[in-house]
Structures are given as structure tokens and as C-alpha cells.
Amino acid sequence: MMLLELKRIHVPPGQRVLFSDVTWQELETILEELGEHRAARIAYDRGILEIMAPLPEDEYAKEIISDLLKALLEELDIEFISLGSTTFKNQAMAQGIEPDQCFYIKNESKIRGKKRLDLTVDPPPDLALEVDVTSRTHPNIYESLKLPELWRFDKGKLQINLLQNGDYVESQESFNFPRLPLVEAIPQYLEQSKTAGRNATIKAFRLWVQQQIQQQ
């Protein structure tokens, strides 16, 4: 019944659909039916399933911020793995989430080469990115999965949340990138990309990172 409903439902960009009383087995079946190559994201919290389709402008912001993060990690010479909107779930907690983007940084070596991740034994990503948090926001799921750092970008502003004693606390500084003013820099370079272009912006951002490193 659920699969039949899903096949008939079209989720317009920026909208979401909620299903209640979805069992874990139904969730697994739905994820398999939806497949990995799709624009829609899911969130699952103790029986409540949400399916949401992002807006084109949110996808643009996600891509540029992701590229800025990759450039930052490369300039800092830090190994990383970016897994995009991989589904992270924990059956024992009855929760699951698909971030807009996520990175393994400090725990990169622990999952390197793995084809499948199991959060009951593998660590969660070190950083996750959510864009347009007004239409869907699930910090409680990330908290339950013990994800150390959550970036939430909405209305041109970046909010960095760090996990402390099981709860997120807003911070002006990243746990993964200490002493860098990213709350101001990331939105600034994202906005710059809209006029200067993606390549020119990434190049300028790399120079900024190099200057920050020299000043430390």
C-alpha cells in the first residue's frame, strides 16, 4: 500500500510529504524502491517518514558550499571523504536522515574503502550540511546519531552547531576547522559565485584560506 502511494505521489520542489506509522521494515523497502539516484531526501524519526524535494536554488547553494569545503580541506591538506546525501540510519534508535552533503574528516580513515556503512558500528560523518532548514529541520535526529558538527544554511546565513553533551550548541567556530571565520566567509563566497562564477570564486577562496594559514 505504501509503495503504491509513493509511486503516485509527486513532491514539488520545496515541498514535503509526511507519512505516519511507518515501520522500520517499510522504511527499508521504501528506500530500496526509491533508489539512490533521486533528488528527494528522506528523514525518519520513530515512525514518521518525511520525503522532501529541494528547490533549485538550494541545490546551487549546496553544491557551492560543498565545493568550498572541499577546497578548504585540500588547502589544509586534510584527507576526507564526501558522501553527499547518503542515508544514515540506526535501527536501534528508529531514526534515519539524508543530509544535503556530509563529510568524513577526522574519522575518514575508519571508513576508507567501505562500501556500506552501519552506524551501529561505524562512526557518523564528522560534518553534515543542511540547506533551506525552514522546510525541513531535524537536528534531533543528528543529535541521536551523535554527529559532531551540523551546518545549517538558510536565507543567506550559515549556522554552525557543535554537539556538546548530546545537544547542539551554536558556535562561531567550527570543530573541524578551528580559528577560521567560516560563518562570515562561506556566505560571502557563495554570494560572490553568483556574479564572479564558480571557478573564479573557488580560486579566490583558496587564496583566502592560504592567507588565513599564514596568519596563524
Image (tube, grey):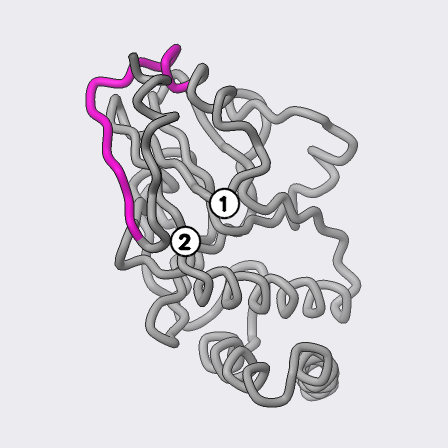
As drawn, is 183 to the left or to the right of 103? Answer: left
Position of residue 142 measured from the top left corner of the image (x, y, whole percent): 39, 41
Judged from the image, the secondary structure of the residue bearing numbered disc 2 is loop
What residue is rendered at 40% in x and 65% in y? 153
Q: Closer to the N terminus: mark 1 or mark 2?
A: 1
Cα gap from disc 1 to disc 2, whole angstroms: 7 Å
What residue is rendered at 60% in x and 62% in y? 66
Q: Quadrant of the N terminus?
A: top left
Q: Are marks 1 and 2 in contact (CB under 8 Å)?
A: yes
The magenta stretch spans residue 213: no
Please say if 160 is above or below 40. Answer: below
Q: Which mark is residue 99?
A: none
Please say if 181 is above or below 32. Answer: below
Which residue corresponds to mark 1? 39
Q: Quadrant of residue 117?
A: top right
For the residue carrying disc 2, how many other residues have a C-alpha within 10 Å: few (<14), some (14-19), or many (20+)? many
| Near-viewer residue (168 or 54) | 54
Mark 1: amino acid: Ala
| Near-viewer residue (62 or 56) | 56
What residue is rendered at 71% in x and 26% in y? 115
Judged from the image, the secondary structure of the residue bearing numbered disc 1 is loop
Which residue corresponds to mark 2? 54
Position of residue 216 measured from the top left corner of the image (x, y, whole percent): 67, 82
What residue is rendered at 63% in x and 70% in y? 68
Which stretch did the figure color magenta? Answer: 15-27
Position of residue 62 measured from the top left corner of the image (x, y, whole percent): 52, 61
| Near-viewer residue (153 or 40) | 40
Q: Quadrant of residue 45?
A: top left
As drawn, is 84 to the left or to the right of 28? Answer: right
Please say if 163 is above or below 70. Answer: above
